[in-house]
Amino acid sequence: MSSPPTTARPSTGRPAATPTDDPRWTCTAGPGSGASAGARRYYDPERYRIVLLDQRGCGRSRPLASDPGVDLGRTQTTQLLLDDIERLRELLAIHSWVVRGGSWGSTLALAYAQAHPQRVDALVLAAVTTTTGREVRWVTEDMRRIFPSAWDRFAGAVPAHLRGIRLVDAYATLLADPDPAVREDAAREWCRWEDTHVSLAPGHRPSRRYEDPAFRLVFARLVTHYWRHAAFLPDGALLRGVTRLAGIPGTLVHGRYDVSGPPDIAWDLHRRWPGSELRIIDDAGHGGAGAFTDAVVDALDRAADRPR
């Protein structure tokens, strides 16, 4: 569901091309991750105009979700994010574009494409999630079966007065506490769990981004906000609505070792999406380098080759 951005293709060394009439957009992983310059490396700059978006409340967007004065309930819903994306398209005078999303970005990309199918030329989705209540429950509750020690620490960090409610709700409450120390401790424990559940792949390494206290708080507040509301979408809406994407080419890239977003999520979407392609990468988890990145780059290169 949420994860570090996957490792991108190394730079080709070619200078960025002058923007053309072939604009493309990408969203990165996890509510609160923000866009990264490395995401540009998936694209051939001689064939793409690359538009990266910092979701409201994170990255270069202001105000940040870590600001205790920000009312997430009023300013943060999936529909508002879709409206932001559409306003960005209009601002840049883009008729239609290829949409790439990873992890939470795949949820957002699917929701955007289903709301505005006439504006989407192709979809490239990696580490696929749909952020349903079932998926949230799996990551925050049921995954104790996979990581019992880490989960017991994660659950045990919740104070007694919040035990008995869903962990995602408990953490969202702690992350809105007026005491900065409570917020900081909750963000640290939430991100420790995030870094645990993203992969079963051998050699998985912790993400350095969680070492930054400012990032931890922004990320944890936004993840818990969107997860506790199951992305503000009716249950199963993205799976039911995938038929709206008929005629839109789509590639889904997913890791066999992805325990955070099990492969059946991508499989079920693929089966209902006419013309979609599913690529399961046997040695990858929730993203990854090597064959996983190569598959995403290949899908984007093929999207650029399609007639417009």
Image (spheres, grey):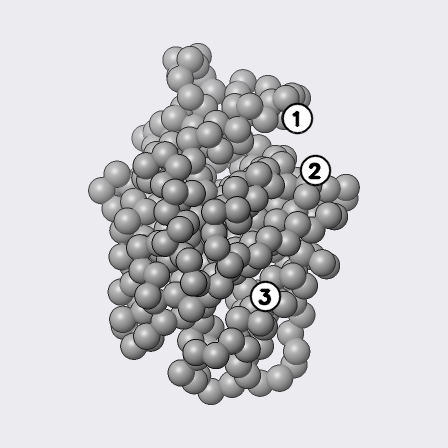
Observer-nearest residue: 246 or 295?
246
Image point 27% across, 51% down: which residue? 80
Tell me, for residue 146, which label it has, or none: 1
Give x and y (percent) for residue 253. 60, 54
Q: Residue furthest left?
A: 74
Q: Residue furthest right?
A: 202
Image point 53% across, 57% down: which residue? 276
> Residue 199 appears in which quarter of the rendering?
top right
169 relative to 139 in the view: left or right: left
Q: Disc 2 designates what residue?
A: 200
Tell which circle, 1 or 2, labels the residue nearer the N-terminal end: 1
Q: Is residue 263 above or below residue 109?
A: above
Give x and y (percent) for residue 252. 56, 54
281 relative to 228 in the view: left or right: right
The quarter in which the C terminus is drawn is: bottom left
Q: CA distance from mark 1 to mark 3?
A: 32 Å
Q: Residue furthest front?
A: 274
| Amino acid at dot 3 | Ala
Q: Disc 3 designates what residue?
A: 299
Observer-nearest residue: 42 or 186?
42
Give x and y (percent) for residue 294. 67, 63
Tell which circle, 3 or 2, labels the residue nearer the N-terminal end: 2
Q: Secondary structure at mark 3?
A: helix
Q: CA distance from mark 1 to mark 2?
A: 9 Å
Image point 34% across, 61% down: which residue? 117
Q: Disc 3 vs disc 2: which is toward the camera?
A: 3
